[in-house]
Image: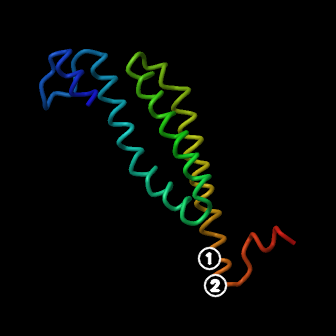
Amino acid sequence: MQVIWARRKYKISPPSTSGHPCFERIFRAQLNCTEYFSLFVPVLWVAGLFFHQGAAALCGLFYLYARFVYFHGYAESAQGRLKPMYVSATILWILIGLSVLGLLEFLLSTYLGCGLMKYLSQ
């Protein structure tokens, strides 16, 4: 919706993707969020299913907030995107780590009968 608003404000009709620098930043921020969304959703689901729903949901909320701040920071200036980008990337790596731990626990306990949680609780 922000790109549609920016197209109207800066008078850039589709399919053009260049023009006013503010429009280009908003357009690029939308594309970047869309690109990462296809990685975020599966990792969030795997972390929730195999590790812990609460931890995955909390990370997901922080990630969405960081992306919101990223989008608005990028719309203001290219430098405004950096800190939220690093925060969202860190949260995404945490979700990937939770997913790997959850899958590893599931596979070890299912196929070998010796999960990580059994080992850690001893």
Q: Residue, x 50% and y 34% (percent of image)?
A: 65
Give the quadrant of residue 97.
bottom right
Expressed as whole percent of the image width and height from the top left, the position of residue 20 reads 25, 15
Mark 2 Cα shell of 10 Å, populated few (<14), some (14-19), many (≥20): few
Q: Residue, x 65% and y 63% (percent of image)?
A: 101
Give the quadrant of residue 115.
bottom right
- Quarter of the image where the N terminus is located: top left
118 above or below 63? below
Expressed as whole percent of the image width and height from the top left, the position of residue 96 reads 57, 54
Q: Residue, x 51% and y 32% (percent of image)?
A: 85
Secondary structure beneath dot 2 equals helix
| Residue highlighted by disc 2 | 111
- Residue extending furthest toward the right: 122
- Which amino acid type corresponds to the residue marked 1 in the rendered image? Leu
Specify whether 50 is left or right of 69: right
Between the C-alphas of marks 1 and 2, the distance is: 6 Å
6 above or below 57? above
Specify whether 108 is left or right of 35: right
- Is there CB contact under 8 Å for labels 1 and 2? yes
- Which amino acid type corresponds to the residue marked 2 in the rendered image? Tyr
Expressed as whole percent of the image width and height from the top left, the position of residue 4 reads 21, 27
Give the quadrant of residue 89.
top right
Specify whether 71 is left or right of 6: right
| Residue highlighted by disc 1 | 107
